[in-house]
Image: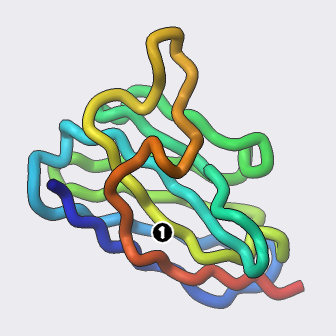
Amino acid sequence: QVQLAESGGGLVQAGESLRLSCAASGRTFSNYAVGWFRQAPGKEREFVAAIRRSGSGTFAADSVKGRFTISRDNAKNTVYLEMNGLKPEDTAVYYCAAKLGSPYDSIGRYYTANHEYPYWGQGTQVTVSS
């Protein structure tokens, strides 16, 4: 199985940027699709973005589309989440998660549910002040 570790979180002001990293170890990382999720205080964990094994395809939630970009470097076993134009409502613990194979089903719908991703990191806190 694969082990995941997030980093890059912190405290920023609204409008600023952060880049989160998800470093993987264990099995061949390029065999895994990766997603980013977040959980704000008192709320359920929600999908943010996902990326295909090769990095050639991505999908993002409407709430972050145009502001957040997911990418990966398989040579470094790392997936990134570039977050621009941060808002106070982006404050949450951010998690990366992985699954073997494709991040979408047979008709091309990306998996956005927590249970679709078996492997999880411990999370990194992102706080955006107004």
Return the residue nearer the eye: 70 or 29: 29
Q: Is residue 115 left or right of residue 86?
A: left
Return the residue nearer the eye: 79 or 33: 33
Please provide percent x and percent y for residue 36.
51, 55
Question: For the point 19% across and 57% down, which residue is it?
Answer: 2
Question: Tag 1: residue type?
Answer: Leu
Question: For the point 26% across and 38% down, which residue is it?
Answer: 100
Q: Farthest residue in the front direction?
A: 115
Q: Is residue 52 above or below residue 24?
A: above
Return the residue nearer the eye: 42 or 94: 42
Scheme by which the image is coloured:
rainbow
Residue 33 falls in image quadrant: top left
Q: Residues within 10 Å of mark 1 (few under 14, many from 20)?
A: many
Quadrant of image for the C terminus: bottom right
Please provide percent x and percent y for residue 9.
53, 81
Quadrant of image for the N terminus: bottom left
Please provide percent x and percent y for residue 5.
32, 73
Q: Farthest residue in the right direction?
A: 130
Question: For the point 32% across and 57% down, which residue is it?
Answer: 119
The secondary element bearing badge 1 is classed as: strand
Please provide percent x and percent y for residue 94.
55, 70
Q: Is residue 29 left or right of residue 56?
A: left
Return the residue nearer the eye: 82 or 62: 62
Residue 46 falls in image quadrant: bottom right
Residue under numbered circle 1: 20
Question: For the point 41% across and 47% down, which residue is it?
Answer: 117
Q: Is residue 14 above or below residue 29?
A: below
